[in-house]
Image (cartoon, rainbow, N blue to C red):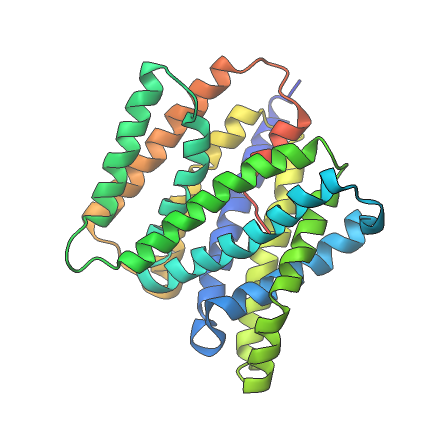
Amino acid sequence: MAARGPGLAGGLVTMVASAASNQVGAAVGARAFDAIGPAGVVAVRQFVAAAVLLPVARPNLRRFTWAQWWPTLLLGLVFATMNLSLYTAVDRIGLGLAVTLEFLGPLGVALAGSRTRLDLVCAVGAGLGVYALVLPGGSSDWFGIGAGVLAAVCWAAYIVLNRMLGARLPGLQAPAAATTVSAVVYLPVAVVLVVQGAFTWVSVLFAVGAGVLSSVIPYACDLVALRTVPPRFFGVVMSVHPVFAALAGLVLLGQVLAVHEWAGIVIVVVVNVLAVVAAQRRRPSGASGAERRAGRRSRF
């Protein structure tokens, strides 16, 4: 049973702080794009996440079975692709638009397989929101939009794989092992950047800041919040991420959104709230711990 009163209020505050930290971290990481590019920022972020998770979870990789290894390897590749595609989208179309497009991933998972009228309305509403967000035309940055959509597909895959691994590996072993795989994938990127002399103290500081703010702090906050907040509230509060992304892009990166872009963000956020509420009403009250973990916003 979820806590009430101060416990619930504290959980909500923690989730909002997690969302704010996540998007501020993305904006901070974007400040290093000129020096080391999106791939360099992602590499450092994966190294930071692995350095934090491995000592905490201590997965015994040598004892993993193939049934545990193959989804772990896939999840590591998903981490690597998801973060790179998101940062590429941020670099080309801005933080607010990129995160809103990425947000279609969990929304799609919430709507998948449903046949209710409300979910059909939500699906149509999400399409209208995306159309309002990007207003497709000759001047659209289709590569940036495609990168945002790819990040959404990866986030959906992350949810599915995380649910699977939640039943096969205890605690934080799955994300720790998957993050290690992703970090290994990005080792060549880091080596090339070091050889080129691209790393500067400022760029490394921004990239490490992105790792701490977008990975370490949100994950810790989510672990605390899920002890006191019902899953449906967790899913609803996730909806503030596109809004916080737009605000972080405005304040920290000077990315001013047009009226139609704000309208698209609002539509997608409202659709997600409706979809989450509807899904939780259909789900049995005894949601498993694995299901809760699978819905977390923080992604390494």
Image quadrant for the N terminus? top right
Q: Residue at horizontal 53%, vertical 82%?
A: 198
Residue drawn at x 53%, y 16% is 283
The answer to which of 212 and 57 lies nearer the viewer is 57
- Whether residue 229 is situated above or below residue 28 in the rendered picture: above
- Image side of residue 144 versus residue 56, left or right: left
On the question of residue 172 being in view, the answer is no
Task: Give residue 10's position: percent from left, percent from top.
Answer: 60, 34
Q: Position of residue 163 (x, y in %)?
A: 62, 33
Q: Tell me the quarter of the picture where residue 248 sits.
A: bottom left
Residue at 53% from the left image edge and 75% from the top image edge: 203
- The mark tally for this picture is 0
Viewed as shown, does residue 218 lie left or right of 104? right
- The image quarter containing residue 196 is bottom right
Q: Position of residue 278 (x, y in %)?
A: 42, 18
Where residue 131 appears, x then y in whole percent?
22, 42
Residue in view at x 41 percent, y 49 percent: 150
Which residue is situated farthest in the left direction here?
138
> Can residue 74 be seen?
yes
Q: Is residue 172 above or below residue 50?
A: above
Compared to residue 294, the image places residue 1 above or below, namely above
